[in-house]
Image: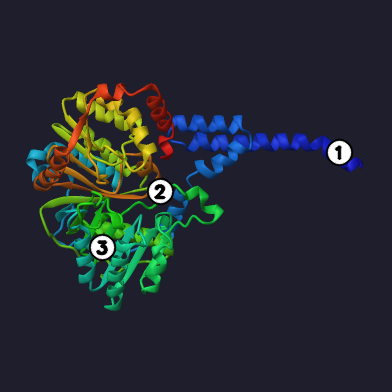
Amino acid sequence: MDVLQRVREVGPHVVAVLTVLVSVLASGHAVLRKRDVRAAVSWVGLIWLVPVLGAVLYLLLGINRIRRRARSLTSRQKHGRFQPAPSMVPLTAQALAEALPSGAHLASLARVVDAVVHRPLLPGNRVTVLESRTNAYPAMLEAIASARVSLSLCSYIFDNDMAGRRFVEALSEAVKRGVEVRVLVDALGSRYTWPPITRRLRRAGVRAARFLPTLMPKRLPFMNLRNHRKVMVVDGRVGFTGGMNIRAHFLPGEDAARDLHFRLEGPVVGHLQETFAEDWAFTTGERLSGEAWFPPLGPAGPVMARGIPDGPDEDFENVRWTLLGALASARDSVRIITPYFLPDQGLITALNVAALRGVRVDLLLPERGNLPFVQWASMAQLWQVMKPGCRVFLTAPPFDHAKLMVVDGMWSLIGSANWDPRSLRLNFEFDVECYDAELARRLETVVDERLSRARPLTLEEVERRSLPIRLRDGLARLLSPYL
């Protein structure tokens, strides 16, 4: 009885001490590790105002374990690297200025990306623009049919539907021809249809894996850290990337959703393959190397290009820094197409400064998005870029999933990243920066085509929304870091 009495007397004090200790440790971690002051303050407040539970929530949602795991795995798994042909000399910022006199001012942007990405800017590339409604899937399926040695494919969504089954059939035929095929699908994206496509791929003899499965409770902290990349490389020589997932509503036709994809040739394809090899090693532990995956790559066209991997690992905020550099370097025009527009305050400021400097900044957004909460949150902050002079246009349905940025008719950014926190902080993305006036002109025709069926959004229209609508949009904006 004396022991029990003693436990009753001491127990609350022990619990109190442990609670304080846990709160100190959790809040100390937040203070030391969180880059954003507001995020650090919010977490520290939650940890102390909601004892224990706040620390548990921080443990589950606030600590980016995937960055530590990514570093650990990549240090153990040394994947292959591509080697440009001996004649292919990476471009310095000075060499870029000399090669592109009319775009010499963009050399400062090249310096920014040099410092952030640590991958060389490579000459000698060809970039072909593909549209979802016409030639994107046919071009990809044709490339799969031509594969002779190796084929790597990464997709966020790979649906088990008519489009998915066409790709499975083409990949299965490649395996039968003796092609080494590897397919990586994000675990969350693979569950958009049931049963998941990975089962069908494996039955067809295709080696497939899921990126960060989320079925087990211990995986719950990773539910937002998804592989949003869309990358395909055939024989190590022909690459595809852009915004398109593999699903039926992108099948060619007038009713197809709108999106852009790109066929790449030249040494930049090696950057696509390196990124896939890193993701594959991360997921499966298998090392892809050798000439089957990384053949020497010579010149194929006039475009100077560089792959930009981005993710919550050592590539953290690569795309965000690239966007900031591009906005700071722009002199004449910035044209942006994105389906989701939730920029942070730094990007909003950069857009505003560009507009105030006299740069024409055009934003093309869908009039009707596929995610209502994201569209409401976007509407709540559009006034912040419209007041200083950025122009916003709303494109008519069908929904446009394209991602594109063109600066001064010389520089282009293509790939998978959206202008939202999920792409710029939480997900694994892959973009390609391109320096070439002809490609930029081709992409500006894409922008102009979108503008021809778009309507301008006025600041008066934004401010005229009723109070209930503005409150709804404002509340959705509070969730923007998680949308």
| Residue at x 41%, y 32% (from the top left corner) | 476
Q: Which residue is mark 1?
A: 6
Do labels 3 and 2 touch, CB within 8 Å? Answer: no
Q: What distance separates the C-alpha of mark 2 from that of mark 1?
A: 49 Å
Residue closer to the observer: 166 or 5: 166
First along the sequence among labels 1 and 3: 1
Q: What residue is pinned by disc 2? A: 313
**Quarter of the figure that contains the C terminus:** top left
Density class for disc 2 (Cα within 10 Å; few <14, some 14-19, many ≥20) is some
Compared with residue 269, is residue 104 higher up or lower down, i.e. above or below? above
Comes first in the chain, label 3 or label 2? 3
Q: Residue at x 12, y 48 (%)?
A: 439
- Name the residue: 30% across, 21% down: 464
Per the model, the C-alpha gap separating discs 1 and 3 is 69 Å
Identify the amino acid type marked 3: Val
SS state under label 1: helix
Vertical position of residue 316 compared to residue 383: above or below:
below
Image depth: mark 1 or mark 3 in front: 3
Across and down, in percent, residue 280 comes to 38, 62
Residue farthest toward the right in the current orientation of the protein = 1
Residue name at image x 36 percent, y 73 percent: 204
Q: Residue furthest front?
A: 255
Q: Nearer the viewer, residue 216 or 311?
A: 216
Tell me where residue 260 appears, x and y as whole percent: 22, 50
Give the SS element for disc 3: strand
**Circle 2/circle 1 CB separation < 8 Å:** no
Task: Report how far apart the C-alphas of labels 3 and 2 lie in the structure.
Answer: 23 Å
Q: Quadrant of the N terminus?
A: top right
Amino acid beneath label 1: Arg
Indicate whether 36 appears above or below 356: below
Q: Residues within 10 Å of mark 1 (few under 14, many from 20)?
A: few
